[in-house]
Image (cartoon, helix red, strand yellow):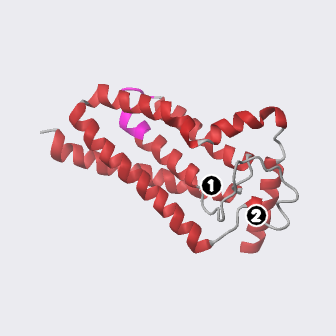
Amino acid sequence: MLEQLIEYDKELFIYLNNLGSETWDNLWLVITNKFTSIPLYAALLFLIYKKFGWKALLLMVVVIAGMITFTDQMTNLFKDTFQRPRPCRAEGVMDLMRYIAPRCGKYGFFSGHASNSMSTAIFAGLLLRPYLKNLIYLLIIWSLIVTYSRIYVGVHYPLDVICGITFGAIAGFGFYKLNQFLLNKFISK
């Protein structure tokens, strides 16, 4: 059954990856670049400052740094444990795909871009929900676009990004709860 699931994953990857065209390649390379999201992160930090103040912002920066470190290191642990080659390194796949990423890492399960972007979306969306009710939906859409870019450029299978999204959502929620506890304990006195 696992072999069949992996085969479906490869087929879906080849289909989704081959939907791309040279016309859109540069746009998806920009989207997948981790530095492209810096203005969004800066805007979120500014909103957090405006709604919560300096003390809370400093505490949240520590919590956010912990969240990103956690999701990033767990991603690396999973990659090193499962050692699933990325599609751009997989025999029988790399001949059938479009590869446009600037580099191809060794292992791909699960996607760090997916887990980091989704954890950020859930954390910030829940945190700012009392002030900006629909922001969480925009952030989830942003995360899904970043996630799809990993398939488009040829470095992750759909299961890699689905597992990354799931892990990121759980981590984002957990760190949001941790943040709420710390805010109540140290800032809201």
Residue 106: which numbered mark, if any?
none
**Is 27 placed above or below 5 here?**
above
Find the residue positioned furthest to the left. 189
Is tag 2's residue or tag 1's residue first in the polypeptide sequence?
2
> Which of the pair 132/94 is nearer the observer?
94
Residue 10 left/right relative to 42? right
Find the residue positioned furthest to the right. 96
At a point 76% along the width and 59% down the height, the residue shown is 88
Confirm whether the magenta stretch covers residue 23: no
> Which residue bears the numbered disc 2?
89
Q: State how far apart marks 2 and 1 are (Cα).
A: 20 Å
Dividing the picture into quarters, in which one does residue 89 lie?
bottom right
Residue 168 left/right relative to 30? left
Stretch of the chain drawn in magenta: 124-133
Three-letter amino acid code at disc 2? Answer: Arg
At a point 40% along the width and 52% down the height, the residue shown is 67
Q: State if disc 1 and disc 2 touch (CB < 8 Å).
A: no
> Which residue bears the numbered disc 1?
162
> Which of the pair 7/63 is nearer the observer?
63
At a point 61% along the width and 41% down the height, the residue shown is 33
Quadrant holding the C terminus: top left
Three-letter amino acid code at disc 1? Answer: Ile
Position of residue 99 measured from the top left corner of the image (x, y, whole percent) = 79, 50
**Is 119 placed above or below 53 here?**
below
